[in-house]
Amino acid sequence: MQHAFRSHCNCCRRRRRRLDLRSTRQERELSARRCHISGVSEQCYLEKVDRGVITKTTSTSDLTRCEIAELLRKEHPKWQGYDVKHKIEVKVIYVSPVDGATHQSSLQMSYFPNGKPLRAGDVFPVLASKTKADKTRSI
């Protein structure tokens, strides 16, 4: 039978330790940071997936400006039926929890968070490693 948590009780200490150990390794190694966006690069490409009975074939175009990709998909007979895919690179400046110094990192995305475009100067949350100064990832 379990009782209310008591700091002096051994079984409560063991239970607390078990709960603390349940947090994943990644959560212990990453720290949430607010960073400033220094640049955003958005390019698009066209992609079409043909599914056969046994095979699946994916056809893609080269990277191009998104306006051109949309125009090709609508107007050009070769590209009709293709989907427009985004490749977004966001460059961020953040203060590392490891050394307290300012670092720059680049994040890759296939869509904008919350559907809103990001611009240079915006504040953006990232996860920064607590052990490696140059390692980040998006939340």
Image: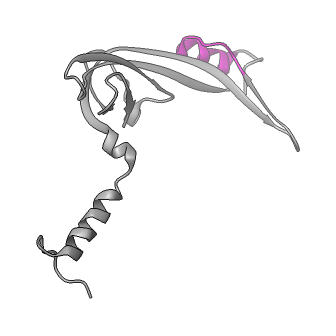
| Residue 75 drawn above or below residue 32 | above
Q: Which residue occupies 76% across, 17% down? A: 77
Is 25 drawn above or below residue 89 in the view shown? Answer: below
The front one of 59 and 94 is 94
Which quadrant of the figure contains the N terminus?
A: bottom left
Q: Is residue 78 left or right of residue 115?
A: right
| For residue 41, above or below residue 26 | above
Q: Is residue 42 magenta?
A: no
Where in the figure is residue 44, as x and y percent of width and height?
Answer: 56, 18
**Viewer-nearest residue: 96 or 69:** 96
Q: Is residue 70 magenta?
A: yes
Image quadrant assignment for residue 107: top left
Magenta stretch, main secondary structure class: helix
Specify the farthest residue to the right.
53
Residue 74: x, y in percent?
A: 65, 21
Is residue 92 shown above or below 138?
A: above
Residue at 45% x, 19% y is 89
Residue range (magenta): 60-75
Residue under the image location 58 percent in, 26 percent down: 85
